[in-house]
Amino acid sequence: MSCKLPVLWILVLAAAMAGCTASPPAKALGEVGTATASDAASDMAADTPGVAQDVDAGQDGDGTGPDSAATEPSACAKACAQWGACMPQPECLAACASDPCATTCLTDPAVKTCESAADCLDLAAGGAPWQSGPAAAGWRVLAGDPLVPVEGGVFSVQEHWNGRNSFVFLLTQDGFAYSTQLWKTNLKAFLKASPTNVHYTFFAVAGKDAAAAQKLVDSQRDAFSATMESLTPLEQCRWWRRLHFANAPLQKFGGPLAAQITAVGGQASFGIDRAQQWRQIGLLQTVGGAPDLKLLTYEPRYWNFEVARAAELAKYPELTVPIHAAKDGAGFDVVVELPAAAELAKWDTLLVDLGAWCKDHKDENCAEWDYIASASLCEQPSGSVPSQPCKAAVPGSAEVTAVAAETVACACTDLAGETVQRKATCKADGSGFGACECGCPLEIARWITTYHREGRWISDITPALAQLGKGGKQRIHFNAANIPMADMSLRFQKRGSALRPVQLVELFGGGSFNQDYNKKYQPIKVAIPAGTKKVELYALVTGHGYGTELDNCAEFCNHTHHFAINGKEFVHQHPVAGQFMGCAEAVDTDGAIPCQFGTWYLGRGGWCPGQDVKPYRIDVTAAVKVGGDNTLTYKGLFNGQDYVPKPNPKQQGGFGASINLRSWLVLYQ
């Protein structure tokens, strides 16, 4: 099902834009009563901060509603002081005097945080200021102020801007089936799932019948008004001022909204994030399901995650080292010159910052499947490869015996600084040997690519300081899978830790996950040097394979990984594997990219599409013998036993189970 508008209207819109401008913002009342659905529908409109409201969102007309004037102003004023950290006091006190919702917004028992109270009154403060320009049209560019005519005035994003709000625009058109289905979904579930700091604006683009298009918006307004009756007084107060409905089709008011749609094509929904950038919104339906507004809420949840992530990063001093700039063709193999070891010793934390971008930031320019991408530290060539003609490989046939390509010995410097022997292979045309085949043994980070969306992930890879902390020339290989454009940097930070990783001891790898999986593992003896202050178990674990086996392993089953150190067991498991919305709930906790064009929402065994792989990282110091030998064992299980695959008689594609495992002990001093 397409989530884009038909093309016909764009020509009409373009013709109208030249002479069509929006009116200046008007001072408008925003009010939703709960006496009847029709009364509420006629009263719903955009508000302007600081304008007195004369009708209570929860009042029933007789003065006995949940937010009636009978409540004591002193309680409201006291709450203003309580929540003063995130909202301006003069505006809060003014709301106590003039806004019937103020007491409910500030004192309802369900209000647990300052941000929740401020969102209810739309009075959050302290965020990024509105940027006056220059505005543009496109994705991830500065947005201008969409001025949308609504009942009672004009809804202005700038007037509601506080650096905390984000803004989502939903449009429809007569005959636009995707949007029609989307708007008919459960509105109560949508509002309950939404972050509280979002404004939603509904409008239409006139197609063949302008009146029919506008009627869709009017009907949506009526449906929300009826839904309000089933909400709590707090929810009514919160949402009546955050839902906006255009009272004319887009062609009649144009402005930045029209310019944006003309630039990017018809979209069922899009937004302005908290950085005041236009943002594309992905597919709002599950595979095989119907469009659902509840899925839309994951987009502003992710925008909130981005802001929180940036705020956390800004807390600490940082040294950034660029690795690769985004351009067509994302995979790379580079040698980067890091600062000297003495300089890097000042930093105790290491992050890798990866941006995986679509060309022009358009979803349709990103690839469609979830593949493994990874970054590894590599050996470096030492010396040269002979420059001379050589014998290329000869492919075999019925008449000809295959002949392998000629090889020549060459040398590489490994990660410990030692010289190791490798080989170079003759090129296919026989003109000479290729580069020395130095290995890339240390995987420092892993990602799973998205379904047709771009993303950015900042991952803690502090254990890699054991190698990268040596400074100087370091070779980094990035297997980009299907990422079309990628940029990467290393971010060294000071977060106050007195300890630094000094050694990585490689442990166990993975393989095909079946009844023989555990047979290959033998105990490993590791000597922990005296003077070691801390020891961590660190592992990257992802399960793959689906469809061919009844238990849907190892992508959708909870495979467990049992590491033991001197008999003390540490278990890593994946409880969200197989849960229908397991990965969707990682949007605002772990930065999974929302609303992808595939099964992004399904919980997986150790990963989510459009997310960095979160390592299993646990302090095992208490289990080791510092200054002595330690015995480590490992096994991978399913339901507490060796996994025995059972064929799926109804399989339709897929492949067998496997575990992609890399594990280490990290020693700190």
Image (cartoon, helix red, strand yellow):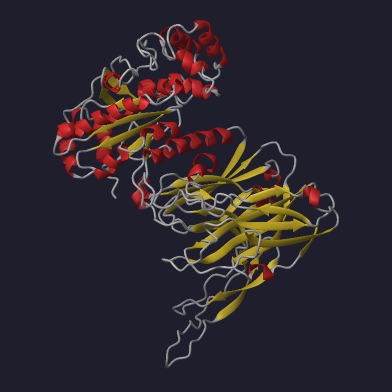
Q: In which quarter of the image is residue 209?
A: top left
Q: In which quarter of the image is residue 198?
A: top left
- Say left or right for 574 vs 622: left
Depth check: 289 or 469 in front? 289
Q: How many labels does the image show?
A: 0
Q: Which residue is drawn at 65% across and 63% down?
A: 641
Depth check: 88 or 631 in front? 631
On the question of residue 264 being in view, the answer is: no
Give x and y (percent) for residue 38. 27, 21
The vertical placement of 633 against 65, above or below, is below
On the question of residue 24 being in view, the answer is: yes
Residue that sits furthest to the bottom in the current view = 399
- Say left or right for 64 vs 180: right
Q: Which residue is drawn at 50% across and 16% down?
A: 106
Give x and y (percent) for residue 84. 54, 16
Give x and y (percent) for residue 553. 54, 61
Depth check: 57 or 411 in front? 57
Give x and y (percent) for residue 496. 70, 36
Q: Residue at x 65, y 43 (%)?
A: 349
Depth check: 397 or 424 in front? 397
The vertical placement of 160 against 611, above or below, is above
